[in-house]
Amino acid sequence: MYKIDFNKPLHIHFIGIGGISMSGLAEVLLDRGFRVSGSDAKSSPLTKALEKKGVRLYYGQRASNITDDVGLVVYTAAISKTNPEYGEAVSRGLPMLSRADLLGQIMKNYPTSIAVAGTHGKTTTTSMLSQILLEADKDPTISVGGILPSIGGNIRVGKSGLFLAEACEYTNSFLSFFPTMEIILNIEPDHLDFFKDIDEIRRSFRAFAELLPKDGFLIISSDIPEYEEITRDLPCQIVTIGMDHEADYMAADLMKDKYGHPAFTLLEKGRKAGNYYLRIPGRHNVSNALAAIAASKLLDVDDEAIVSGLSHFTGAERRFEFKGEIGGVVIIDDYAHHPTEIEATLSAAKDYPHNEVWCVFQPHTYSRTKSLMSEFARALSKADHVVLADIYAARENDTLGVSSEDLQHRIQELGVHCEYFNSFDLIEQYLLSHCSKGDLIFTMGAGDVVRIGEELLGKK
């Protein structure tokens, strides 16, 4: 594999630079003195921000975008070998790195590198820990998979030796990393277009844990079934967090305010160790907070900064994000696209003031929808009303013979009111004519479903 010499900056071209992770890595390299160019399908707030920082942006991917002075090409897992820029780089014999390999090489340059992994909760936990480290003046470099208001985006370049990043298991990309501390929040079936089954996913997380050095730290949830299979015989220090099973860090005396924001007492090895309050709802976020607390304590962050950081954290964009109110109807947007995430979000919604809960869900990828169809139906049935949009294909071309109408029928079989519409306009018209004052609308999914709520709020 090609190794970057960070003491000799060169011109790096990113294929698909507009992605949340790719754009962040581009910013890190800019700060290190590298020249950066990149291409994407269309303009976005992330690409516009890069252009303002001096990045040469190409909209549309063409072989001519690989100019003679490019010294390295970086690409994402979504880029196929038939991509014209990829093909041009290969024909020229240029060095090439995947996004994951680049992130791993950047991570290796930091004495303390923290990788946050799990089927879900990565962005929120990374953001929580970011907030704590900022309040503790640790000056970290941060790469988060969402927009974090406190850093004004998805990336922050610090001057300390501390690097914090999300670590995704898809295509085993997190196996390219060099962490000194890991957080594993949960391990569940997902990305079944790549993994064969849950056993293969668990083996991948085990391989991820094995990346840690002897003096490293693994923070892992004891609520993961048979989590000891992941930790057995590892040379690093193991620290556990748990909501339902015995762990080093647990929550007690859990209470909620009228918006579902939890307060709890921290139990550290069974002893009370302080009180915490979160400004984001949901029991699942208490678990995320336990992971952030455990990491902070291992990094010698004082308790005052931990309490303050968590109490000031109001969430990342698209995570139970309040979007506005129209006609007495509150609209909240959430990135949930896995059944466990949907169930957690809709459970948290029960504690939020409302008459009826409407969930406007856009399934994400055909493979996930097909493999977890029953689980999606059960999770979505926690809403009073479900409205389905077409499946967001993302990286997939094959529909696998599955559609949102199939999911609609499964939900209806559970006795829950569910409608399906093949356009956002029809969904918006339906909501405007059927929602009542005091109702709560969730736009939910990893695609562009957020546009529905934003369009509704633009209508007077």
Image: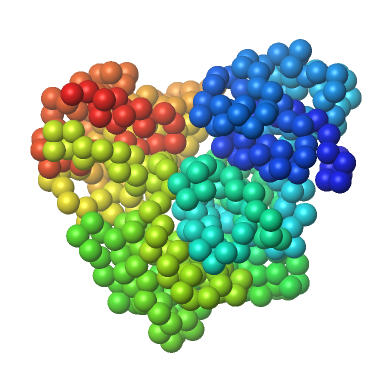
Q: Nearer the viewer, residue 260 or 393?
A: 260
Considering only vertical position in the picture, is 66 above or below 111? above
Residue 68 relative to residue 147: left or right: right
Residue 85 relative to residue 192: left or right: right
Residue 239 picture quarter = bottom right
Q: Nearer the viewer, residue 437 or 183?
A: 437
Q: Quadrant of the N terminus?
A: top right
Residue 383 relative to residue 270: left or right: left
Numbered-mark total: 0
Considering only vertical position in the picture, is 151 above or below 271? above
At 45% across and 64% down in the image, what residue appears? 309
Q: Position of residue 419 (x, y in %)?
A: 23, 28
Q: Position of residue 92 (x, y in %)?
A: 88, 20
Considering only vertical position in the picture, is 39 above or below 6? above
At 17% across and 51% down in the image, what residue appears? 353
At 25% across and 29% down in the image, what residue appears? 457
For residue 435, say whether it is visible.
yes
Residue 67 relative to residue 171: left or right: right
Q: Nearer the viewer, residue 373 or 84?
A: 84
